[in-house]
Amino acid sequence: MRQFRTPAILAFGISGCAAAASFLATFILARDAGATVLGHYALAASTASMLATLALCGLDWITLREIAGDLRLGDKGRARATLIRITKAVGLSTALVAAVYLFVNLAAPMASFLGGDEYAMLAVTLGIVAWPFLRLGYSGLRASGKPTYGQLFESMPTFLFAGCISILALMSHTPNAGQVTTVFFGMQIVAALGAWAMLMPKLSIWNVPSINPSSANLRAGLTIMATAFLQIFSEWVLLAGLSATASAAEAGAFRVAYQILTIPALIAVTTESYVAPKFGGDFRLGQPQRAKLRHKRATILMLFLATPILLAVLIYPAQILELVFGREFVVAATSISIMAIGQIFNIIRGPIGSVLIMSGNERFQIKVTIAGLIILLVLATLLIPKCGLIGAAISYSAPLVFRSIAGYWAAHRIFKSGHKI
């Protein structure tokens, strides 16, 4: 089957190894440091991801869409101008977001009202700086025809982080939340430098453009950014809600459940990232039926890889949590089963997100995302104070189901017409 040919399968192999490395790091932290440290680290990582997404302005997806399309048309000069303009915009926005966060956090420490760790929340500044340039770097590699290298650098922080945590465990050192968070963001910086070291020689051989890229690309990026920001904000709301109304330990248990489901989620994200440049080229050349066939093949591969994991989580949630992480985390057994249902819908729909963005329908996607966020906020407000982890799990899954159904309907119309909705 074409779904299992290289280099796609190599990208999935790297993604699978990254999932295993992330699982190993979480396992070590859960066993050695406990649920509270894991909860503080999870809150800091989610905060950094949310604010870094804001700084990135959605321009990583614009990089994929525009540069992939330019190169399919043979316009290397325009591709170069687009990447340069995007990089400058990301640099300015990143500096602004990082400076504002650092000032606010020093003036009124976020840990005091979110129930987090003071040093972990301070280290978030590193993540705000590192993550946008890392994502922009590996998006540039994917758009330029190097999807495997893009996947490698996307996964590299996870590999390095797992290695550092393993070394600390062998040295019998139990890190605190601030140390764990700093190491994690430090590895992102290392990976970002590596991605750009590989991308710059390719950029230097692209010819100087005769025209400048449209500023409409930057405006479209803001819409995409808002979508990604709201999706990450949804995760942050759940973690912050648990930390504020329950305990850091429950937030840590939720993080472990979320970590297990990161494996099928990572399969979905890897597929989205791998096929996005190809969708961009298909729609740029007016070939929606080719994009439809590509989507079908990608969905089959996603189902093949993710179904065994999701079935295991649905059937043996308590056994998996106790065997791997310890009895302290069995409290999340029911929650992880509920969250798995949401991920089943996410996998069945296939790489719909990249179809919407690469076809220029980012406005529809943000409307669906806003509706999903409203569902999450209403459910989280009503259920987390009363039901704790189970309430958080329901709040997590309901928007996934809604977005999956709405996205699938939209993609069907796009494949049929080839136009914006």
Image (cartoon, rainbow, N blue to C red):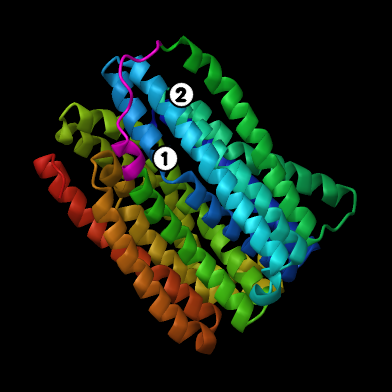
Q: In the rendered view, would you say 179 is above or below 86? A: below
Amino acid identity at mark 2: Lys
Tag on residue 146? 2
Label 1 sits on residue = 59
Q: In the rendered view, would you say 332 is above or below 78? A: below
What x and y, as percent, mark residue 15?
53, 40
- 25 on left or right of 67: right
Answer yes or no: is residue 271 visible: no
Q: Is residue 24 magenta?
A: no
- 199 on left or right of 311: right
Main secondary structure type of the part rendered in magenta:
loop
Q: Quadrant of residue 406?
A: bottom left
- Which range of residues does the magenta coloring cover? 207-220
- 25 on left or right of 402: right
Q: In the rendered view, would you say 148 is above or below 317? A: above
Quadrant for the N terminus, please. top left
Tag on residue 226? none
Foreground: 227 or 403? 227
Give the farthest residue toward the left: 417
What x and y, as percent, mark residue 341?
39, 67
